[in-house]
Amino acid sequence: MATRTQNRSQNRSTNRTSANRSGGTNHSAFSWGDNAGPIIGAALAGAAVGLAANYGRKFLMQGMESMAGDWDEILAAEHDLALGIFDKMLATDPTQSFKRKMLLMKLTHALDKHAHQEEMVVYPALREANEAVDADTLEGEHGYIKTFIYELNEMGPEASNWLEKVREFRQLVSSHAHMEEEQVFPRFKQALDEDQNARITSLVNRDGFWMA
Ligand SMILES: [Fe+2]
Ligand SMILES: [Fe+2]
């Protein structure tokens, strides 16, 4: 009785034999044919240009941010950026639904990237430094920030209480940013030595680069 291994090798040799019968070339449905070279080359070149453009954009965005200085200064600059988007949203009226949608998308991306940098680097470092209570409070607030984004998307830009919701949302982000900038981050930074500080800055920049 043939073993399973013997059966598998028998199947492989049967397949090779049938390929040989059809002229020795494997005309698989997935074979590219003789003229595929230039097409693949062009597709790869296109993908490379796209990738390079995307990397260029990321370098530009995160490069500009890293010039802001240390991790806490980068994050404070991002708070200002988000609050600026809120102000633009609050200056709209219900006829500007497209502008409202675009600004909400921009805000979502900015807050998402920002939260990622904090949740993947800064808050874990805080927990490591026995600041878990603050880290957990702040991370919990990020959840409510996402809830506001969900609610604004659900209600749509023409809703009569859109501005009111945005105002409430801005208030949460502003007090959250205030707690980070005025209390938690300065206290934590004071306890870091130069190398630890540089390490956190580098990790925040790296995370921001991938999220940009
Ligand atoms: Fe935060
Ligand atoms: Fe923050």
Image (spheres, rainbow, N blue to C red):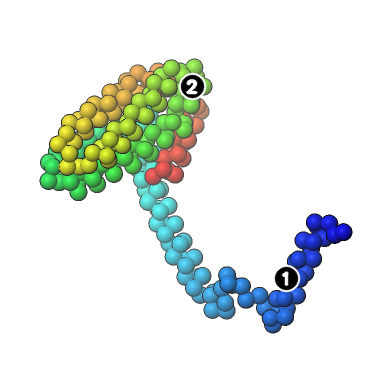
Instruction: Choose the circle earlier in sequence order: 1 or 2.
Output: 1
What amino acid is labelled 2 in the image?
Arg
Q: How many marks?
A: 2
Residue 28 drawn at (x, y percent): 61, 73
* Circle 1 or circle 2, nearest the eye: 1
Q: Is residue 194 visible to the viewer in this orientation of the structure? A: no
Residue 98 drawn at (x, y percent): 20, 49
Mark 1 secondary-structure assignment: helix
Marks 1/2: CA–CA distance? 59 Å
Indicate which disc residue 15 carries: 1
What amino acid is labelled 1 in the image?
Asn
User: Crowding at label 1, few (<14), some or many (≥20) Cα neighbours within 10 Å?
Assistant: few
Residue 41 drawn at (x, y percent): 51, 70
Quarter of the rendering containing residue 3: bottom right
Lateral position of residue 159 relative to residue 151, left or right: left
Lateral position of residue 187 relative to residue 199, left or right: left
Mark 2 secondary-structure assignment: helix
Mark 1 CB in 8 Å range of ligand 1?
no
From the image, which quarter does the N terminus lie in?
Answer: bottom right
Quarter of the rendering containing residue 112: top left
Lateral position of residue 54 relative to residue 169, left or right: right
Q: Which residue sits at x=45%, y=26%?
A: 123
Q: Are marks 1 and 2 in contact (CB under 8 Å)?
A: no
From the image, which quarter does the C terminus lie in?
Answer: top left
Q: Which residue sits at x=37%, y=29%?
A: 143
Nearest to the observer: residue 196 or residue 107: 107
Mark 2 CB in 8 Å range of ligand 1?
no
Nearest to the observer: residue 207 or residue 169: 169
Indicate which disc residue 150 carries: none
Q: Which residue sits at x=41%, y=19%?
A: 134
The residue pinned by badge 2 equals 127
User: Crowding at label 2, few (<14), some or many (≥20) Cα neighbours within 10 Å?
Assistant: some
